[in-house]
Amino acid sequence: MFEKFTKISLLILSIFMSCCTSIKCQNKVDYSWILGTYNFENPNITIIKFNSDTILSVSAVKGDASVYTDAGLICDTDGNLKVIATNCAVMNSNFDTVSNSNLLKDRYLNYCQERNGAFWPFEQSVLVLPFIGDKNKFRILFTNTQSISTEQDSLRSFFYSYLNGAVIDFSKKEHGELINVWQRLYNDTITVSHITACKKDNNEDWWIILPMDGRPRYSILSYSIDTIEFFKKDCLGKIGFNNIDFEGQASFSPDRTKYARFNIANGLHLFDFDSKSGSLLNPRLIKLSVPPGNISGGLCFSPNSKYLYVFCDKLLYQLDVSNPDVESTKVLIDTLDLTSGKEYIASFNHGLLAPDGRIYISGIWDSKYLNVINSPNCKGKLCDLVQQAIPLPTKNSWGVPNYPHFRDRKDVPECPPDKTIEWSESNYKIEFKESFLTYDFKSSKPKSISFYELSGRLIKLIELTNSNGQINIEFLSNGYFIVKIVCNNRQYIEKIIKL
């Protein structure tokens, strides 16, 4: 009897370990991030290491190649970096270029001809995925680029590409070898940017989405244990991206029900996604008020897939994508604070959901900070955006890693109950009379009241001792301001005007 029980126990353990190998062991493959900038003389790189709760470390290393914009990365099962891929070079965990990495420099427009991997300007143009069925290999998907003028073809972007592939193999060489380089995976023309992927329902295979060049179409590829192959094209609506389609960011939601693509030049393109059939559905074009003079920007879904954050250089929006009327839900979370006195501040460009459940946001051009959304599952300003929250030891240009979602992120708690209470007129009363603000919080005792410019700069913070009272606001000039009142763990925020 004991022997039979032991055999059954071992069988169950074996099944469990098998599941761990195929699913659970992928849970830390995005636990290390790489950020950098174009510097072929001194390619210093920032490495950020996470656990499921917080950032563990931020440090600088020197690599054989520069990392510029959104690198393709993957870690081992313990969360340590395994592959760092740009479109110009592939490095291993020692930040050494792997064997045959130089073959990637064979490109049309000579972007990769400088020393140390040089300069590749196109965003989300490389993606690293597990090699299904072989833990010693990884697949690299990447674009090349060719240029075309509007006189030659008015429908095409300034740049276009095909999808290429390579494999990095650690089975024969400990430090890695690049094989099957420049394998043509898809022959129709696509944009040079926005390679994205999500898992299929079996949690092993993948869907890969490629925006078509110059058309409102998306090519969908299927990646299984045998091959990457064309699956279908979805032609959606009449409005696609214009010839500025190489900037911005695209992403799936963690639950794989939404797909979004954005840059400032083209607006937010939002779709439903059917992970069973691999179909994009219900196209929506959402216009946002954006600052002039920029074409980039980015986006990121919340862990619960309910909210979409859109990054517009100096503006940051939140939208509720669970609402049928998505556009009506947009909230301006904040504007970029230009008064901090810090050098190389990060604007709002690309965002990525981290292992700790927070969203980290890079800046445009060179910056030495990351912005962070601490509670992205919370509605409106309760999401707790902190600007310039994470100082970096090296400069970072434009991007964050181009990681797909390896898990559904149900591990991230929903918004805490004490943050979700909505204020109503029965909770408070605020009035403005001449140069005074009168407040009355009937059911709570406020702790403080703060006045902010629309840029986010703090004008004045006043500690409060009573649940009602009057404040002289002669220190405010005429115009619009943000008022924030903190009561215990709740906060009330309102836009006001002083005439």
Image: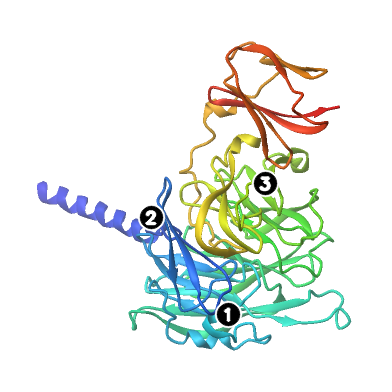
In contact (CB < 8 Å): disc 2 and disc 3: no
Describe residue 15's horizontal placement relative to residue 322 as left or right: left
Dot 2: element: helix
Q: Position of residue 327 (x, y in %)?
A: 77, 43
- In this picture, is 72 found above or below 7? below
- Determine which residue is flagged by label 2: 24
| Amino acid type assigned to the residue bearing label 1 in the image | Ala
Q: Distance between the residues labelled 2 and 3?
A: 45 Å
Badge 2, how many Cα within 10 Å: few under 14, some, many 20+? some
- Residue 339: image tag: 3
- Residue 118: image tag: 1
Residue drawn 81% across the image and 50% down it: 287
Towards the viewer: 121 or 457: 457
| Amino acid type assigned to the residue bearing label 2 in the image | Lys
Q: Where is residue 353 in the image (x, y as percent from the top left)?
A: 54, 52
Q: Position of residue 134 (x, y in %)?
A: 39, 72
Q: In which quarter of the image is residue 250?
A: bottom right
Dot 1: element: loop
Towards the viewer: 109 or 47: 47
Describe residue 267's horizontal placement relative to residue 3 as left or right: right
Q: Where is residue 41 in the image (x, y as percent from the top left)?
A: 53, 79
